[in-house]
Image (cartoon, grey):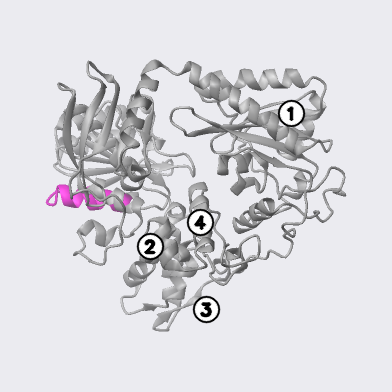
Protein backbone atom coordinates (compact mmCIF):
# COMPACT_ATOMS: atom_id res chain seq x y z
CA UNK A 1 0.00 0.00 0.00
CA UNK A 2 1.07 3.59 -0.57
CA UNK A 3 0.11 4.83 2.92
CA UNK A 4 3.10 5.85 4.99
CA UNK A 5 2.76 4.40 8.47
CA UNK A 6 6.30 5.21 9.56
CA UNK A 7 5.06 7.59 12.25
CA UNK A 8 2.78 4.97 13.77
CA UNK A 9 3.53 4.40 17.46
CA UNK A 10 4.86 0.92 18.25
CA UNK A 11 2.06 -1.28 19.49
CA UNK A 12 1.94 -3.54 22.50
CA UNK A 13 4.49 -1.65 24.63
CA UNK A 14 2.77 0.12 27.50
CA UNK A 15 0.06 2.62 28.41
CA UNK A 16 0.94 6.33 28.26
CA UNK A 17 0.90 7.96 31.68
CA UNK A 18 0.07 11.54 32.50
CA UNK A 19 3.02 13.85 31.94
CA UNK A 20 4.90 11.58 29.52
CA UNK A 21 3.98 13.65 26.48
CA UNK A 22 6.24 16.66 25.92
CA UNK A 23 3.79 18.84 23.98
CA UNK A 24 1.91 19.02 20.69
CA UNK A 25 5.05 18.97 18.60
CA UNK A 26 6.72 16.03 20.32
CA UNK A 27 6.74 12.45 19.08
CA UNK A 28 4.02 10.40 20.81
CA UNK A 29 5.06 7.82 23.36
CA UNK A 30 4.26 4.11 22.77
CA UNK A 31 0.56 3.32 23.13
CA UNK A 32 -1.76 0.34 23.35
CA UNK A 33 -2.30 -2.11 20.49
CA UNK A 34 -5.95 -1.07 20.01
CA UNK A 35 -4.98 2.60 19.82
CA UNK A 36 -2.25 1.77 17.30
CA UNK A 37 -4.85 -0.03 15.18
CA UNK A 38 -7.08 3.04 15.32
CA UNK A 39 -4.13 5.19 14.21
CA UNK A 40 -3.65 2.92 11.20
CA UNK A 41 -7.32 3.26 10.29
CA UNK A 42 -7.08 7.04 10.64
CA UNK A 43 -4.12 7.10 8.28
CA UNK A 44 -5.99 4.96 5.77
CA UNK A 45 -8.79 7.55 5.75
CA UNK A 46 -6.26 10.10 4.53
CA UNK A 47 -6.39 12.32 7.65
CA UNK A 48 -3.73 14.98 8.18
CA UNK A 49 -2.26 14.77 11.68
CA UNK A 50 -1.72 18.52 11.75
CA UNK A 51 -5.41 19.18 11.05
CA UNK A 52 -8.46 19.65 13.27
CA UNK A 53 -11.83 17.97 13.71
CA UNK A 54 -14.01 19.30 10.86
CA UNK A 55 -16.73 21.78 11.77
CA UNK A 56 -20.01 22.72 10.17
CA UNK A 57 -19.99 26.52 9.93
CA UNK A 58 -23.56 26.75 8.68
CA UNK A 59 -25.64 25.84 11.71
CA UNK A 60 -25.72 24.80 15.34
CA UNK A 61 -26.93 21.19 15.47
CA UNK A 62 -30.34 20.36 16.87
CA UNK A 63 -30.39 17.56 19.44
CA UNK A 64 -32.94 14.85 18.47
CA UNK A 65 -35.96 15.17 20.74
CA UNK A 66 -35.67 11.80 22.46
CA UNK A 67 -31.92 12.15 22.97
CA UNK A 68 -32.35 15.70 24.26
CA UNK A 69 -35.01 14.78 26.81
CA UNK A 70 -33.04 11.79 28.12
CA UNK A 71 -29.40 12.81 27.73
CA UNK A 72 -29.17 16.55 28.38
CA UNK A 73 -30.39 16.30 32.01
CA UNK A 74 -27.77 13.59 32.64
CA UNK A 75 -25.03 15.72 31.04
CA UNK A 76 -25.96 18.69 33.23
CA UNK A 77 -26.15 16.54 36.38
CA UNK A 78 -22.74 14.93 35.77
CA UNK A 79 -21.16 18.34 35.18
CA UNK A 80 -22.79 19.58 38.42
CA UNK A 81 -21.40 16.64 40.39
CA UNK A 82 -17.89 17.30 39.04
CA UNK A 83 -17.87 20.69 40.73
CA UNK A 84 -14.67 22.67 40.13
CA UNK A 85 -12.88 19.75 38.46
CA UNK A 86 -11.36 20.69 35.11
CA UNK A 87 -13.53 18.30 33.13
CA UNK A 88 -16.05 18.97 30.37
CA UNK A 89 -19.02 16.73 29.65
CA UNK A 90 -19.87 16.30 25.96
CA UNK A 91 -22.76 14.73 24.04
CA UNK A 92 -22.27 13.65 20.42
CA UNK A 93 -24.80 12.26 17.96
CA UNK A 94 -24.79 8.89 16.23
CA UNK A 95 -22.64 10.26 13.37
CA UNK A 96 -20.11 11.84 15.73
CA UNK A 97 -21.34 15.44 15.55
CA UNK A 98 -20.95 17.40 18.79
CA UNK A 99 -24.40 18.31 20.14
CA UNK A 100 -23.55 19.75 23.57
CA UNK A 101 -20.43 20.72 25.52
CA UNK A 102 -20.68 21.71 29.20
CA UNK A 103 -17.44 22.91 30.83
CA UNK A 104 -16.53 24.15 34.30
CA UNK A 105 -15.92 27.75 33.18
CA UNK A 106 -15.68 30.04 30.15
CA UNK A 107 -11.90 29.69 29.85
CA UNK A 108 -12.16 25.91 29.70
CA UNK A 109 -14.86 26.03 27.03
CA UNK A 110 -12.85 28.49 24.94
CA UNK A 111 -9.82 26.21 25.19
CA UNK A 112 -11.86 23.21 24.03
CA UNK A 113 -13.33 25.29 21.21
CA UNK A 114 -9.78 26.14 20.08
CA UNK A 115 -8.95 22.42 20.05
CA UNK A 116 -12.03 21.65 17.96
CA UNK A 117 -14.38 20.26 20.63
CA UNK A 118 -17.23 22.66 19.88
CA UNK A 119 -20.85 22.53 18.74
CA UNK A 120 -21.16 21.15 15.22
CA UNK A 121 -17.67 19.63 15.08
CA UNK A 122 -17.51 16.07 13.76
CA UNK A 123 -15.62 13.64 15.99
CA UNK A 124 -16.17 10.31 14.27
CA UNK A 125 -12.95 8.35 13.89
CA UNK A 126 -12.95 8.74 10.12
CA UNK A 127 -13.11 12.54 10.42
CA UNK A 128 -11.18 13.33 13.62
CA UNK A 129 -8.90 10.32 13.85
CA UNK A 130 -8.33 8.34 17.04
CA UNK A 131 -10.51 9.72 19.85
CA UNK A 132 -12.74 8.31 22.55
CA UNK A 133 -16.02 9.49 21.01
CA UNK A 134 -15.26 8.02 17.58
CA UNK A 135 -14.10 4.70 19.05
CA UNK A 136 -17.16 4.44 21.29
CA UNK A 137 -19.46 4.95 18.28
CA UNK A 138 -17.48 2.56 16.10
CA UNK A 139 -17.19 -0.31 18.59
CA UNK A 140 -20.26 0.36 20.78
CA UNK A 141 -18.03 0.03 23.85
CA UNK A 142 -16.62 2.53 26.39
CA UNK A 143 -13.20 3.89 25.46
CA UNK A 144 -10.38 5.77 27.20
CA UNK A 145 -7.89 7.79 25.13
CA UNK A 146 -5.15 9.44 27.19
CA UNK A 147 -2.58 12.14 26.55
CA UNK A 148 -0.51 11.39 23.48
CA UNK A 149 -2.95 8.77 22.16
CA UNK A 150 -5.06 11.01 19.89
CA UNK A 151 -4.21 10.83 16.19
CA UNK A 152 -4.41 14.61 15.64
CA UNK A 153 -1.39 16.43 17.08
CA UNK A 154 -3.63 19.31 18.16
CA UNK A 155 -5.39 16.98 20.64
CA UNK A 156 -2.22 15.63 22.26
CA UNK A 157 -2.89 17.32 25.61
CA UNK A 158 -6.43 15.88 25.99
CA UNK A 159 -7.47 12.96 28.16
CA UNK A 160 -10.89 11.61 27.18
CA UNK A 161 -13.30 8.88 28.09
CA UNK A 162 -16.55 8.14 26.25
CA UNK A 163 -19.30 5.54 26.15
CA UNK A 164 -21.98 4.83 23.53
CA UNK A 165 -25.68 5.46 24.13
CA UNK A 166 -27.60 2.46 22.77
CA UNK A 167 -31.39 2.50 22.56
CA UNK A 168 -32.66 -0.19 24.95
CA UNK A 169 -35.23 -1.55 22.48
CA UNK A 170 -33.99 -0.93 18.94
CA UNK A 171 -30.35 -1.50 19.97
CA UNK A 172 -29.34 1.29 17.60
CA UNK A 173 -26.57 3.65 18.61
CA UNK A 174 -28.08 7.04 19.47
CA UNK A 175 -24.82 8.84 20.22
CA UNK A 176 -22.14 8.93 22.91
CA UNK A 177 -21.43 10.81 26.12
CA UNK A 178 -17.88 11.64 27.14
CA UNK A 179 -15.66 13.45 29.63
CA UNK A 180 -12.62 15.49 28.59
CA UNK A 181 -9.79 16.89 30.71
CA UNK A 182 -6.71 19.00 30.00
CA UNK A 183 -4.68 18.24 33.13
CA UNK A 184 -3.51 14.69 32.44
CA UNK A 185 -6.36 13.12 34.39
CA UNK A 186 -6.60 9.34 34.11
CA UNK A 187 -8.60 8.55 30.99
CA UNK A 188 -9.79 5.20 32.37
CA UNK A 189 -11.55 7.02 35.23
CA UNK A 190 -13.15 9.41 32.74
CA UNK A 191 -14.35 6.44 30.65
CA UNK A 192 -15.83 4.71 33.68
CA UNK A 193 -17.76 7.86 34.59
CA UNK A 194 -18.92 8.22 30.99
CA UNK A 195 -20.16 4.61 31.02
CA UNK A 196 -22.27 5.34 34.12
CA UNK A 197 -23.67 8.46 32.45
CA UNK A 198 -24.53 6.53 29.27
CA UNK A 199 -26.25 3.86 31.36
CA UNK A 200 -28.31 6.57 33.06
CA UNK A 201 -29.36 7.94 29.66
CA UNK A 202 -30.38 4.46 28.50
CA UNK A 203 -32.44 3.93 31.66
CA UNK A 204 -34.19 7.24 30.98
CA UNK A 205 -34.93 6.10 27.42
CA UNK A 206 -36.35 2.84 28.68
CA UNK A 207 -38.55 4.63 31.19
CA UNK A 208 -39.87 7.02 28.53
CA UNK A 209 -40.53 4.35 25.94
CA UNK A 210 -44.19 3.61 25.46
CA UNK A 211 -45.86 0.32 26.22
CA UNK A 212 -46.42 -0.38 22.51
CA UNK A 213 -42.65 -0.16 21.83
CA UNK A 214 -41.98 -2.72 24.55
CA UNK A 215 -44.72 -4.94 23.14
CA UNK A 216 -43.27 -4.65 19.64
CA UNK A 217 -39.81 -5.61 20.91
CA UNK A 218 -41.25 -8.64 22.70
CA UNK A 219 -42.99 -9.89 19.55
CA UNK A 220 -39.91 -9.22 17.41
CA UNK A 221 -37.60 -11.17 19.74
CA UNK A 222 -40.09 -14.03 19.93
CA UNK A 223 -39.90 -14.41 16.15
CA UNK A 224 -36.25 -13.52 15.54
CA UNK A 225 -34.77 -15.85 18.17
CA UNK A 226 -36.30 -18.94 16.64
CA UNK A 227 -35.12 -18.54 13.04
CA UNK A 228 -32.23 -17.47 10.82
CA UNK A 229 -34.67 -16.20 8.17
CA UNK A 230 -35.37 -12.46 7.70
CA UNK A 231 -37.57 -10.94 10.41
CA UNK A 232 -38.69 -7.31 10.71
CA UNK A 233 -40.94 -5.43 13.09
CA UNK A 234 -42.08 -1.85 12.74
CA UNK A 235 -44.47 0.73 14.09
CA UNK A 236 -44.96 4.37 13.22
CA UNK A 237 -41.81 5.33 15.16
CA UNK A 238 -39.33 2.44 15.18
CA UNK A 239 -38.15 -0.40 12.96
CA UNK A 240 -36.30 -3.57 13.99
CA UNK A 241 -34.58 -6.04 11.64
CA UNK A 242 -32.35 -9.04 12.14
CA UNK A 243 -29.14 -9.57 10.15
CA UNK A 244 -30.78 -11.63 7.40
CA UNK A 245 -33.39 -8.95 6.78
CA UNK A 246 -30.78 -6.19 6.77
CA UNK A 247 -28.71 -8.06 4.16
CA UNK A 248 -31.63 -8.94 1.93
CA UNK A 249 -33.81 -5.82 2.04
CA UNK A 250 -32.63 -2.35 1.13
CA UNK A 251 -34.25 0.85 2.43
CA UNK A 252 -36.54 1.07 -0.60
CA UNK A 253 -37.54 -2.59 -0.27
CA UNK A 254 -38.42 -2.07 3.39
CA UNK A 255 -40.54 0.98 2.56
CA UNK A 256 -42.51 -0.98 -0.05
CA UNK A 257 -42.77 -3.92 2.36
CA UNK A 258 -44.20 -1.66 5.05
CA UNK A 259 -46.91 -0.35 2.71
CA UNK A 260 -47.82 -3.86 1.51
CA UNK A 261 -47.97 -5.20 5.06
CA UNK A 262 -50.22 -2.36 6.22
CA UNK A 263 -52.52 -2.88 3.22
CA UNK A 264 -52.69 -6.64 3.86
CA UNK A 265 -53.56 -6.09 7.53
CA UNK A 266 -56.06 -3.28 7.00
CA UNK A 267 -59.00 -5.60 7.68
CA UNK A 268 -57.40 -8.68 9.22
CA UNK A 269 -54.90 -9.54 11.95
CA UNK A 270 -52.56 -11.69 9.83
CA UNK A 271 -51.83 -12.51 6.21
CA UNK A 272 -49.13 -13.15 3.60
CA UNK A 273 -47.39 -10.87 1.10
CA UNK A 274 -45.20 -11.29 -1.98
CA UNK A 275 -42.68 -8.53 -2.69
CA UNK A 276 -40.55 -8.07 -5.82
CA UNK A 277 -37.20 -6.75 -4.58
CA UNK A 278 -35.20 -3.99 -6.25
CA UNK A 279 -32.48 -6.45 -7.31
CA UNK A 280 -35.00 -8.69 -9.11
CA UNK A 281 -35.37 -11.30 -6.37
CA UNK A 282 -38.58 -12.00 -4.45
CA UNK A 283 -39.58 -12.00 -0.80
CA UNK A 284 -42.51 -14.02 0.57
CA UNK A 285 -43.54 -13.35 4.15
CA UNK A 286 -46.13 -13.91 6.83
CA UNK A 287 -47.29 -10.69 8.51
CA UNK A 288 -49.32 -10.17 11.67
CA UNK A 289 -50.32 -7.37 13.98
CA UNK A 290 -48.73 -7.02 17.39
CA UNK A 291 -52.16 -5.99 18.72
CA UNK A 292 -54.95 -7.82 16.90
CA UNK A 293 -57.25 -4.83 17.43
CA UNK A 294 -54.92 -1.97 16.48
CA UNK A 295 -52.61 -1.81 13.46
CA UNK A 296 -50.85 1.27 14.87
CA UNK A 297 -49.33 -0.81 17.67
CA UNK A 298 -46.98 -2.44 15.16
CA UNK A 299 -46.48 -5.22 12.63
CA UNK A 300 -44.13 -8.20 12.58
CA UNK A 301 -42.94 -9.60 9.24
CA UNK A 302 -41.33 -13.03 9.05
CA UNK A 303 -40.13 -14.70 5.86
CA UNK A 304 -42.37 -17.54 4.79
CA UNK A 305 -40.78 -21.02 4.85
CA UNK A 306 -40.65 -21.41 1.07
CA UNK A 307 -37.85 -21.98 -1.37
CA UNK A 308 -38.47 -18.66 -3.09
CA UNK A 309 -36.69 -16.49 -0.56
CA UNK A 310 -32.96 -15.91 -0.70
CA UNK A 311 -31.50 -15.53 2.79
CA UNK A 312 -28.07 -14.35 1.70
CA UNK A 313 -26.86 -12.36 -1.32
CA UNK A 314 -25.01 -14.48 -3.86
CA UNK A 315 -22.69 -13.72 -6.75
CA UNK A 316 -24.54 -14.84 -9.84
CA UNK A 317 -22.57 -15.84 -12.91
CA UNK A 318 -25.41 -15.34 -15.39
CA UNK A 319 -25.71 -12.16 -17.45
CA UNK A 320 -29.18 -11.38 -18.66
CA UNK A 321 -29.65 -9.12 -21.63
CA UNK A 322 -29.43 -5.57 -20.37
CA UNK A 323 -32.50 -3.37 -20.42
CA UNK A 324 -32.49 0.11 -21.89
CA UNK A 325 -32.10 1.62 -18.42
CA UNK A 326 -29.25 -0.72 -17.52
CA UNK A 327 -27.43 -0.09 -20.81
CA UNK A 328 -27.66 3.70 -20.48
CA UNK A 329 -27.68 4.33 -16.72
CA UNK A 330 -24.59 2.29 -15.94
CA UNK A 331 -23.41 0.77 -12.65
CA UNK A 332 -23.63 -2.46 -10.70
CA UNK A 333 -23.70 -1.07 -7.14
CA UNK A 334 -26.71 -1.89 -5.01
CA UNK A 335 -27.59 1.83 -4.91
CA UNK A 336 -27.77 2.19 -8.70
CA UNK A 337 -29.47 -1.18 -9.10
CA UNK A 338 -32.15 0.06 -6.70
CA UNK A 339 -32.54 3.36 -8.58
CA UNK A 340 -32.99 1.49 -11.87
CA UNK A 341 -35.53 -0.83 -10.26
CA UNK A 342 -37.57 2.11 -8.99
CA UNK A 343 -37.26 3.85 -12.35
CA UNK A 344 -38.53 0.72 -14.04
CA UNK A 345 -41.70 0.87 -11.93
CA UNK A 346 -42.59 4.39 -13.10
CA UNK A 347 -45.80 4.32 -15.13
CA UNK A 348 -47.72 6.89 -17.13
CA UNK A 349 -50.28 7.06 -14.30
CA UNK A 350 -47.91 8.94 -12.00
CA UNK A 351 -48.58 12.70 -12.09
CA UNK A 352 -44.99 13.83 -11.46
CA UNK A 353 -41.54 12.38 -10.82
CA UNK A 354 -38.68 14.32 -9.19
CA UNK A 355 -35.05 13.26 -9.70
CA UNK A 356 -32.79 14.53 -6.92
CA UNK A 357 -29.06 14.30 -6.35
CA UNK A 358 -25.85 16.26 -6.41
CA UNK A 359 -24.71 18.03 -9.57
CA UNK A 360 -23.31 15.60 -12.13
CA UNK A 361 -25.03 12.44 -10.89
CA UNK A 362 -27.16 11.92 -14.02
CA UNK A 363 -30.57 13.28 -13.04
CA UNK A 364 -31.33 14.71 -16.49
CA UNK A 365 -30.17 11.52 -18.21
CA UNK A 366 -32.48 9.38 -16.06
CA UNK A 367 -35.37 11.80 -16.61
CA UNK A 368 -34.92 11.56 -20.40
CA UNK A 369 -34.72 7.75 -20.25
CA UNK A 370 -37.96 7.50 -18.28
CA UNK A 371 -39.72 10.04 -20.49
CA UNK A 372 -38.76 8.02 -23.58
CA UNK A 373 -39.88 4.75 -22.00
CA UNK A 374 -43.19 5.92 -20.52
CA UNK A 375 -44.34 8.15 -23.43
CA UNK A 376 -42.18 7.03 -26.38
CA UNK A 377 -44.07 8.99 -29.04
CA UNK A 378 -44.19 12.31 -27.16
CA UNK A 379 -41.49 14.96 -27.78
CA UNK A 380 -39.49 16.03 -24.72
CA UNK A 381 -39.11 19.74 -23.91
CA UNK A 382 -36.58 20.88 -21.28
CA UNK A 383 -36.86 24.07 -19.21
CA UNK A 384 -34.28 25.36 -16.70
CA UNK A 385 -35.20 27.28 -13.54
CA UNK A 386 -31.60 28.12 -12.73
CA UNK A 387 -30.88 31.77 -11.92
CA UNK A 388 -28.62 31.98 -14.99
CA UNK A 389 -31.62 31.35 -17.26
CA UNK A 390 -32.57 34.39 -19.43
CA UNK A 391 -36.06 34.66 -17.90
CA UNK A 392 -37.39 35.05 -14.38
CA UNK A 393 -38.92 32.31 -12.24
CA UNK A 394 -42.53 33.29 -12.93
CA UNK A 395 -41.77 33.24 -16.66
CA UNK A 396 -40.42 29.69 -16.34
CA UNK A 397 -43.61 28.63 -14.59
CA UNK A 398 -45.75 30.32 -17.26
CA UNK A 399 -43.87 28.58 -20.07
CA UNK A 400 -44.18 25.17 -18.39
CA UNK A 401 -47.88 25.77 -17.76
CA UNK A 402 -48.45 26.74 -21.39
CA UNK A 403 -46.54 23.69 -22.62
CA UNK A 404 -48.59 21.34 -20.44
CA UNK A 405 -51.88 23.02 -21.41
CA UNK A 406 -51.47 23.35 -25.20
CA UNK A 407 -49.20 20.46 -26.28
CA UNK A 408 -48.93 16.71 -25.70
CA UNK A 409 -45.21 17.07 -24.95
CA UNK A 410 -43.42 15.69 -21.91
CA UNK A 411 -41.83 18.52 -19.92
CA UNK A 412 -38.60 18.24 -17.94
CA UNK A 413 -38.05 21.17 -15.56
CA UNK A 414 -34.50 21.40 -14.20
CA UNK A 415 -33.21 22.96 -10.96
CA UNK A 416 -36.60 23.21 -9.27
CA UNK A 417 -34.81 24.05 -6.01
CA UNK A 418 -34.52 27.57 -7.48
CA UNK A 419 -38.29 28.08 -7.64
CA UNK A 420 -40.35 29.58 -4.81
CA UNK A 421 -42.36 26.93 -2.97
CA UNK A 422 -45.73 28.34 -4.02
CA UNK A 423 -44.75 28.39 -7.70
CA UNK A 424 -43.53 24.81 -7.58
CA UNK A 425 -46.62 23.63 -5.69
CA UNK A 426 -48.86 25.18 -8.35
CA UNK A 427 -46.97 23.37 -11.13
CA UNK A 428 -47.13 20.03 -9.30
CA UNK A 429 -50.85 20.53 -8.71
CA UNK A 430 -51.42 21.26 -12.38
CA UNK A 431 -49.51 18.11 -13.33
CA UNK A 432 -51.64 16.07 -10.92
CA UNK A 433 -54.82 17.37 -12.59
CA UNK A 434 -53.70 16.15 -16.04
CA UNK A 435 -53.95 12.49 -15.06
CA UNK A 436 -50.81 11.16 -16.74
CA UNK A 437 -47.05 11.64 -16.44
CA UNK A 438 -46.31 14.87 -18.28
CA UNK A 439 -43.97 16.64 -15.84
CA UNK A 440 -40.56 15.45 -14.64
CA UNK A 441 -38.47 17.54 -12.23
CA UNK A 442 -34.80 17.57 -11.34
CA UNK A 443 -33.52 18.94 -8.05
CA UNK A 444 -29.88 19.64 -7.19
CA UNK A 445 -28.76 18.66 -3.69
CA UNK A 446 -25.91 20.35 -1.91
CA UNK A 447 -23.27 17.74 -0.95
CA UNK A 448 -24.40 15.95 2.20
CA UNK A 449 -27.91 17.45 2.24
CA UNK A 450 -29.71 14.16 1.58
CA UNK A 451 -33.11 13.43 0.02
CA UNK A 452 -36.32 15.41 0.43
CA UNK A 453 -39.95 14.68 -0.39
CA UNK A 454 -40.99 18.34 -0.46
CA UNK A 455 -41.53 18.38 -4.22
CA UNK A 456 -44.14 15.64 -4.41
CA UNK A 457 -45.78 16.13 -1.03
CA UNK A 458 -49.53 15.81 -1.22
CA UNK A 459 -49.46 13.99 -4.56
CA UNK A 460 -49.08 10.38 -5.64
CA UNK A 461 -45.77 11.33 -7.25
CA UNK A 462 -42.36 9.83 -6.70
CA UNK A 463 -38.90 11.18 -5.86
CA UNK A 464 -35.89 9.21 -7.10
CA UNK A 465 -32.60 10.11 -5.45
CA UNK A 466 -29.37 9.31 -7.30
CA UNK A 467 -26.49 8.84 -4.83
CA UNK A 468 -23.19 10.66 -5.44
CA UNK A 469 -20.38 8.69 -7.03
CA UNK A 470 -18.33 8.69 -3.82
CA UNK A 471 -21.05 6.57 -2.16
CA UNK A 472 -20.88 3.94 -4.92
CA UNK A 473 -17.22 3.81 -6.03
CA UNK A 474 -17.57 0.37 -7.59
CA UNK A 475 -19.67 1.95 -10.35
CA UNK A 476 -16.52 3.67 -11.63
CA UNK A 477 -15.37 0.26 -12.90
CA UNK A 478 -18.44 0.14 -15.19
CA UNK A 479 -18.57 3.83 -16.08
CA UNK A 480 -14.99 4.18 -17.36
CA UNK A 481 -15.25 1.77 -20.33
CA UNK A 482 -18.82 2.89 -21.01
CA UNK A 483 -17.91 6.59 -21.18
CA UNK A 484 -14.71 6.00 -23.17
CA UNK A 485 -16.70 3.98 -25.70
CA UNK A 486 -19.12 6.90 -26.10
CA UNK A 487 -16.25 9.24 -26.97
CA UNK A 488 -14.17 6.82 -29.08
CA UNK A 489 -15.77 3.48 -29.74
CA UNK A 490 -12.48 1.94 -30.93
CA UNK A 491 -10.44 2.92 -27.87
CA UNK A 492 -9.53 0.27 -25.31
CA UNK A 493 -9.06 0.86 -21.58
CA UNK A 494 -6.12 -0.59 -19.67
CA UNK A 495 -7.36 -2.69 -16.70
CA UNK A 496 -5.36 -0.66 -14.16
CA UNK A 497 -7.00 2.63 -15.13
CA UNK A 498 -10.54 2.05 -13.74
CA UNK A 499 -9.09 0.55 -10.55
CA UNK A 500 -6.98 3.69 -10.05
CA UNK A 501 -9.90 6.04 -10.71
CA UNK A 502 -12.01 4.22 -8.08
CA UNK A 503 -9.76 5.85 -5.46
CA UNK A 504 -10.71 9.40 -6.45
CA UNK A 505 -13.43 11.23 -4.48
CA UNK A 506 -15.22 12.63 -7.60
CA UNK A 507 -16.76 15.81 -6.16
CA UNK A 508 -18.14 16.51 -9.66
CA UNK A 509 -19.60 12.99 -9.85
CA UNK A 510 -20.16 11.33 -13.25
CA UNK A 511 -19.87 14.66 -15.09
CA UNK A 512 -16.34 15.11 -13.76
CA UNK A 513 -15.40 11.54 -14.70
CA UNK A 514 -16.85 11.95 -18.20
CA UNK A 515 -15.05 15.27 -18.70
CA UNK A 516 -11.73 13.73 -17.71
CA UNK A 517 -12.12 10.72 -20.00
CA UNK A 518 -13.34 12.86 -22.90
CA UNK A 519 -10.32 15.17 -22.62
CA UNK A 520 -7.86 12.29 -22.41
CA UNK A 521 -9.47 10.41 -25.30
CA UNK A 522 -9.56 13.44 -27.59
CA UNK A 523 -5.92 14.32 -26.94
CA UNK A 524 -4.58 10.79 -27.30
CA UNK A 525 -3.62 9.16 -30.60
CA UNK A 526 -3.11 5.75 -28.98
CA UNK A 527 -5.48 2.81 -29.27
CA UNK A 528 -5.52 2.23 -25.50
CA UNK A 529 -6.06 4.65 -22.61
CA UNK A 530 -3.70 3.86 -19.75
CA UNK A 531 -2.46 5.36 -16.48
CA UNK A 532 0.23 7.37 -18.22
CA UNK A 533 -2.51 9.39 -19.95
CA UNK A 534 -4.07 10.60 -16.68
CA UNK A 535 -3.24 13.98 -15.14
CA UNK A 536 -1.10 13.65 -12.01
CA UNK A 537 -3.95 14.94 -9.81
CA UNK A 538 -5.90 11.75 -10.54
CA UNK A 539 -3.02 9.45 -9.64
CA UNK A 540 -2.44 8.39 -6.04
CA UNK A 541 -5.58 10.25 -4.99
CA UNK A 542 -7.19 8.97 -1.82
CA UNK A 543 -10.91 8.79 -1.08
CA UNK A 544 -12.16 9.28 2.45
CA UNK A 545 -14.39 6.35 3.26
CA UNK A 546 -17.88 6.77 4.66
CA UNK A 547 -18.59 5.36 8.11
CA UNK A 548 -20.27 2.19 6.87
CA UNK A 549 -17.57 1.67 4.22
CA UNK A 550 -14.97 2.14 6.93
CA UNK A 551 -16.63 -0.50 9.13
CA UNK A 552 -17.00 -2.90 6.19
CA UNK A 553 -13.34 -2.43 5.21
CA UNK A 554 -12.25 -3.18 8.77
CA UNK A 555 -14.47 -6.29 8.87
CA UNK A 556 -12.84 -7.58 5.67
CA UNK A 557 -9.34 -6.97 7.03
CA UNK A 558 -10.17 -8.77 10.26
CA UNK A 559 -11.70 -11.71 8.36
CA UNK A 560 -8.50 -12.03 6.32
CA UNK A 561 -6.43 -11.85 9.51
CA UNK A 562 -8.51 -14.52 11.21
CA UNK A 563 -8.29 -16.82 8.17
CA UNK A 564 -4.53 -16.42 7.60
CA UNK A 565 -5.13 -14.48 4.39
CA UNK A 566 -7.25 -17.25 2.82
CA UNK A 567 -9.76 -15.37 0.67
CA UNK A 568 -12.22 -18.26 0.28
CA UNK A 569 -12.52 -18.79 4.03
CA UNK A 570 -12.66 -15.04 4.64
CA UNK A 571 -15.49 -14.65 2.13
CA UNK A 572 -17.37 -17.54 3.73
CA UNK A 573 -17.01 -16.06 7.22
CA UNK A 574 -18.33 -12.72 5.93
CA UNK A 575 -21.29 -14.35 4.19
CA UNK A 576 -20.31 -13.09 0.72
CA UNK A 577 -19.07 -14.71 -2.46
CA UNK A 578 -15.44 -14.69 -3.60
CA UNK A 579 -16.24 -12.42 -6.53
CA UNK A 580 -17.76 -9.87 -4.15
CA UNK A 581 -14.72 -10.10 -1.87
CA UNK A 582 -12.31 -9.52 -4.76
CA UNK A 583 -14.32 -6.49 -5.87
CA UNK A 584 -14.29 -5.04 -2.35
CA UNK A 585 -10.55 -5.66 -2.06
CA UNK A 586 -10.12 -3.45 -5.13
CA UNK A 587 -12.68 -0.86 -4.04
CA UNK A 588 -11.19 -0.46 -0.54
CA UNK A 589 -7.60 -0.79 -1.80
CA UNK A 590 -6.73 -3.62 0.57
CA UNK A 591 -3.22 -4.79 -0.25
CA UNK A 592 -2.90 -8.48 0.62
CA UNK A 593 0.88 -8.06 1.07
CA UNK A 594 0.53 -5.11 3.43
CA UNK A 595 1.42 -5.31 7.10
CA UNK A 596 -2.09 -4.16 7.91
CA UNK A 597 -3.07 -7.82 7.50
CA UNK A 598 -0.61 -8.83 10.21
CA UNK A 599 -2.26 -9.10 13.61
CA UNK A 600 -1.28 -6.90 16.53
CA UNK A 601 0.76 -9.80 17.90
CA UNK A 602 2.70 -9.91 14.64
CA UNK A 603 1.49 -13.35 13.56
CA UNK A 604 -0.19 -13.60 10.14
CA UNK A 605 -2.15 -16.68 11.16
CA UNK A 606 -4.10 -14.64 13.71
CA UNK A 607 -3.68 -17.18 16.52
Q: Which residue is mark 4?
A: 553
Q: Residue at x 21, y 59 (%)?
A: 324
Q: Is residue 372 magenta?
A: yes
Q: Nearer the viewer, residue 387 or 88?
A: 88
> Number of labelled discs?
4
Task: For marks 1 and 4, give the CA distance.
Answer: 33 Å
Viewed as shown, does residue 561 lie left or right of 294?
Answer: right
Label 2 near label 1: C-beta < 8 Å? Answer: no
Which mark sits nearer the N-terminus, 1 or 4?
A: 1
In this view, 215 is above or below 327: above
Q: Earlier in the sequence, mark 1 or mark 3?
A: 1
Specify which label sits upstream in the sequence, 4 or 3: 3
Examine the structure image and report whether residue 485 is included in the region drawn in magenta: no
Residue 323, x across and y down, in percent:
20, 59
Q: On the image, numbered disc 3 is attached to which residue? A: 532
* Mark closest to the chain's N terminus, 2 or 4: 4
Name which of mark 1 and mark 2 comes first in the sequence: 1
Secondary-structure class at tag 3 = helix
Magenta stretch, main secondary structure, is helix
Cα distance between the residues tagged 4 and 3? 29 Å
Which stretch appears magenta? 364-381
Amino acid sequence: MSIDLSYMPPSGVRRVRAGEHDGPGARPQPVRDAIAESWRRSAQCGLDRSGSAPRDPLSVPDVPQRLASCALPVVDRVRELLGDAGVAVTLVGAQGRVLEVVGPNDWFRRRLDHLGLSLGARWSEEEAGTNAFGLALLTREPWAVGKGEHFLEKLAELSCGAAPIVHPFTQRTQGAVGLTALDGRDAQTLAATAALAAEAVQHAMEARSSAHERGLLTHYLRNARSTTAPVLAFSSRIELANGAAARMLGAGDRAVLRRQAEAELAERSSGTIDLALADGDSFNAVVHRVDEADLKQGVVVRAAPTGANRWRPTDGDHHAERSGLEASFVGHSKAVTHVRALAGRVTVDLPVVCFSGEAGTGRLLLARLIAARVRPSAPVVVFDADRSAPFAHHEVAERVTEELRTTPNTVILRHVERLPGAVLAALVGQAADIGELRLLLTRTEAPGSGPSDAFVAGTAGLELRIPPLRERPEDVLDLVPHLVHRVRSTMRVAPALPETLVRHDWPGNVTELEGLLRTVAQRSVKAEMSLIDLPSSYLNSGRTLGRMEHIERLAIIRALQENAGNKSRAAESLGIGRATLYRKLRTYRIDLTSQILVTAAGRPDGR
